[in-house]
Image (tube, rainbow, N blue to C red):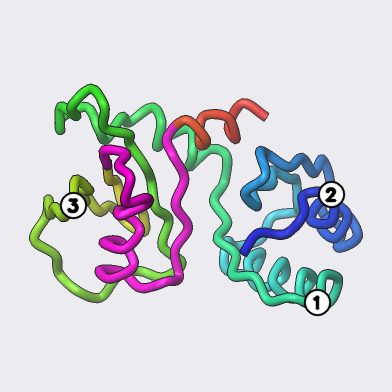
């Protein structure tokens, strides 16, 4: 469940984050904060959101440099996606423990590659909805967040 972007921005600013910008309406925020690890920032944000918004939100933090590298590396290129397939990226909160035989496919959703804590997938939109999320959550659990490659590009441009 996503929170309202104005509330998210206000909560982050109140916690000392600066240059806070929300992106789209799906819980994405870009901000500046003194040097800290991703896990430290995630815990801080989760605590602030619980206190300020009264709801628990799992957060996943990645630097803009990491997102730009993800775009530049173009992990989808070698998979030659069909024209209607949409590339998506899923960020894992924790490193996966299981060894996977990739790529894997189900209902026009394909998990193509896993690198570090990032899953590269693609899907063909269908009336069944977000079938790729079923495959991802079944394989990796619910401590994930998924964004289209286009959304990641918008976040980086902020």
Q: Rounded to the nearest whole Å, what is the CA distance between mark 2 and mark 1?
A: 15 Å
In the rendered structure, find residue 6 and report the number of the disc placed on it: 2
Q: Earlier in the sequence, mark 1 or mark 3?
A: 1
Q: Out of 82 and 156, give the one closest to the viewer.
A: 82
In the rendered structure, find residue 107 and report the number of the disc placed on it: 3
Q: What's drawn in magenta, residue-wise?
A: 123-149
Q: Is 134 a magenta residue?
A: yes
91 displayed left or right of 137:
right
Q: Earlier in the sequence, mark 2 or mark 3?
A: 2
Q: Quadrant of the N terminus?
A: bottom right
Q: Out of 51 and 110, give the one closest to the viewer.
A: 110
143 displayed left or right of 73:
right
Q: Residue at x 42, y 35 (%)?
A: 149
Vertical comparison of 18 with 78: above or below: below
For label 1, the SS is loop
8 displayed left or right of 99:
right
Q: Residue at x 27, y 41 (%)?
A: 122
Q: Which residue is mark 1?
A: 54
Q: Residue at x 61, y 26 (%)?
A: 157
Vertical comparison of 152 with 141: above or below: above
Q: Out of 119 and 1, give the one closest to the viewer.
A: 1
Q: Is 21 a magenta residue?
A: no
């Amino acid at each position: 469940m996503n929170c309202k972007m104005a509330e998210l921005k206000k909560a982050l600013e109140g916690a000392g984050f600066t240059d806070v910008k929300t992106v789209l309406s799906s819980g994405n925020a870009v901000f500046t904060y003194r040097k800290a690890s991703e896990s430290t920032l995630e815990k801080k944000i989760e605590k602030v959101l619980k206190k300020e918004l009264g709801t628990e939100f799992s957060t996943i933090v990645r630097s803009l440099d990491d997102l730009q590298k993800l775009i530049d590396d173009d992990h989808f290129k070698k998979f030659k996606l069909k024209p209607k397939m949409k590339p998506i990226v899923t960020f894992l909160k924790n490193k996966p423990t299981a060894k996977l035989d990739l790529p894997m496919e189900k209902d026009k959703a394909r998990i193509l590659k896993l690198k570090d804590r990032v899953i590269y997938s693609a899907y063909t939109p269908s009336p069944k909805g977000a079938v790729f999320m079923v495959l991802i959550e079944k394989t990796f659990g619910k401590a994930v967040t998924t964004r289209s490659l286009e959304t990641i590009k918008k976040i980086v441009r902020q």
